[in-house]
Image (spheres, rainbow, N blue to C red):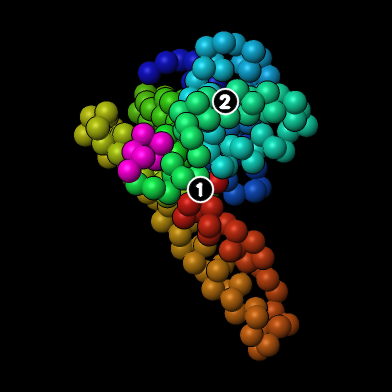
Amino acid sequence: MEQIYMIPVNEAFDECAKNDVCECPICKMLEKLENKEVDMALGPAMMEPSTRVETNEKGFCHHHFDMMLQRPNKLSLALILESHLDVIRGKMKGNPLKNIVIPKHKSQVKTAKGLEESCYICEKVDFHINRMIETTVYLHGYDADFRLKTKKQKFFCLPHYQKMVEYAKNKLDKKKFEEFYADVSLIQEKYFDKIIKDVSWFAKKFDYRYDSEPWYDSKDAVERAIKLLSGK
């Protein structure tokens, strides 16, 4: 467990504990990581030969292409695409469309499928977020202050909740795992009860019989339910 990850983990848990908006702290870290890696890919890293080799080979997923498109620097993206497209074209000699749709052209089909499944930014983000989840579990087990921060969280999205529990099960001793599981599961159970109530009330508000009733906390219930189930 590297100490370098303690700072972003603590910052995310502090922000989510204080923020009125319900957020999963791991999703918060993920969002910051993605923005940092997108900015790096379009900035200094773009000029590094070793990085260009990687981006040319791996490309980017649809989600991270969309993020790059939202950035103002279209020239950097165009330069990345220029060399990336050259590499792909070199691997798909002849008619690219024919090579994709006709099964006998196995190498070309493999190229297209490989690009669909690879992303330079996803690999970077996955590596770091896994280290941050590792740090989260470690801090809970060995830092009393961080355990209090954990208890102040509003919820964890289910994908990250599952990852944390799996890692804790494999890395912590039995006592520390039971403490970790008890803390995060209590948070999840309370939030599930609330979100179910809020979503149900949101639906009732479309019934004329409840028209004069207040919304309470249900106006953003659908969005919060999706964040809980799938993360960001």
| Residue drawn at x 43%, y 26% as measured from the top left | 127
The label on residue 97 is none
Answer whether residue 68 is visible to the viewer in this image: yes
Q: Total of numbered circles in the picture?
A: 2
Residues rendered magenta in the picture: 104-110
Q: Secondary structure at mark 1?
A: loop
| Residue drawn at x 41%, y 29% as measured from the top left | 130
How far across and how far down the image is residue 63, in percent?
57, 42
Q: Quadrant of the N terminus?
A: top left
Check whether the beta carbons of the residues at disc 1 and disc 2 lie within 8 A of each other: no
| Residue drawn at x 54%, y 73% as measured from the top left | 200
Q: How many residues crowd mark 2 within 10 Å: few (<14), some (14–19), many (20+)? A: few
Q: Secondary structure at mark 2?
A: helix
Q: Which residue is mark 1?
A: 231
Q: Amino acid at mark 2?
A: Asp
Q: Residue furthest top?
A: 49
Mark nearer the viewer, 1 or 2: 2
Task: Relative to 28, say whether 146 is above or below.
Answer: above
Sequence-wise first label, 1 or 2:
2
Q: Is residue 14 magenta?
A: no
**Is the stretch drawn in magenta largely helix, strand or loop?**
helix
Front position in the image: 221 or 151? 221
| Residue drawn at x 65%, y 78% as measured from the top left | 205
Q: Quadrant of residue 164?
A: top left
Q: Residue furthest left?
A: 174
Q: Which residue is mark 2?
A: 86
In the image, is 72 to the left or to the right of 111?
A: right
Q: Residue furthest bottom?
A: 209
Q: CA distance from mark 1 to mark 2?
A: 35 Å
Task: Relative to 3, say whether 112 is above or below.
Answer: below
In the image, is 213 to the left or to the right of 8?
A: right
